[in-house]
Amino acid sequence: MKEIDYLEAIKLAEEGKWFPVYILLGNSLYLKDRFLKALSDNFLASEGDLEIREAGENDLETLLENQENACLFSLRRVLYLKNVHELKPGSRKELYKRIRSLKDQILILEQEGSPEELSDVDFPEGVLVKDPILGEKQLRNWIIGSLGRKGKRISPEAVEFLLTHTDGTLDTLVSEIEKISLYEEGEVISKETVEKIITPSIEGTAFELVEAVLTGKKGKAISLLNQIFYLGKEAPGRLIFLLFRQFRLLWQLANLGEIKRPDYFKLAQKLGDHPLAVKKALECLNRYTRERAQEALEALVGIDKKIKQGGEDPHLLLEKFIVEFSS
């Protein structure tokens, strides 16, 4: 099979060129999302559906059911089979043997790594899609371009710091760029801004812990709690402040009702908080009712009072809070 990387696959899809079968070998969630969007915008447009099935949760017959009649009720379809590598080896081989190209369907198989059985796979019109290998110059240009599309400019020193203090993968850089663009309200991003955001600190670790609580990642939150207690005596108080801020934002946003196409800067101005904090709260709003957010706020007030009065272990109090409110 022909091999291409995600950037080429995305570019071809945006130009209206695609293949009947794709096997995705890369691990970048960011590039997979961009690739699916390119196919949805151009191959499907408003004339078809994107259907996603989890390979590990279905048997082979379910994964391929009605493939011959896939487009009976819609003009076009993209069928995305996730985590094919979770199938048993025999099932994977049978899956590759049985799939075939259909006129109005694109079939995507998400297969991590490069398993041996792919050496026997032969789709004359299909492609293997891998993560791109980007050089330093390409990464620099990508960072500058990504921030440029957000209306921001970044200094050369800031780009250098970003590259040398991250793992250099697109997924990590996407996350950091999003934080940087929301944190910095001016047009030009300095090295000092980047350094403040991505260098480990009480605030950075606490903010990561808060995000873990809000997204239900209990184990990660407790691990970060253990880390933060080594960052200084003021760490627990700073953590309580950030937890209180995020749950207060959840409570405020819940009172606003449904928010379509949110403008984080305008919402932040209205609520008297930071755009990044507002964005994170909005992303987790579906997990908390106004009443649940109120309960968390009352619990944090109680924890703060007990810590200031002394006599109770701050670590234990915050651990109990994490267990209760990240469930």
Image (tube, grey):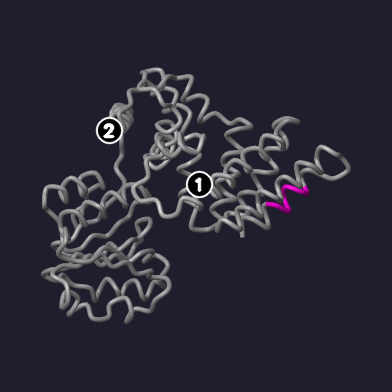
**Does label 2 or label 1 sit earlier along the sequence?**
2
How many numbered dots are placed on residues in this image? 2
Give yes or no for residue 247 being in the magenta stretch. no
Quadrant where the image shows the N terminus: bottom left
| Residue at 16% in and 63% down | 20
Which percent across, then down, holds residue 140?
Answer: 32, 27
Which percent across, then down, holds residue 315?
Answer: 76, 44
The residue stretch that appears in magenta = 316-321
Q: Amino acid at mark 2?
A: Arg
Q: Nearer the viewer, residue 46 or 274?
A: 274
The residue wearing badge 2 is 149
The residue wearing badge 1 is 281
| Residue at 54% in and 49% down | 250
SS for tag 2? loop
* Residue 8 placement: quadrant: top left
Which percent across, then down, holds residue 306?
Answer: 81, 44
Secondary structure mostly taken by the magenta-highlighted segment of the chain: helix
| Residue at 26% in and 63% down | 108
Please say if 243 is above or below 201: below
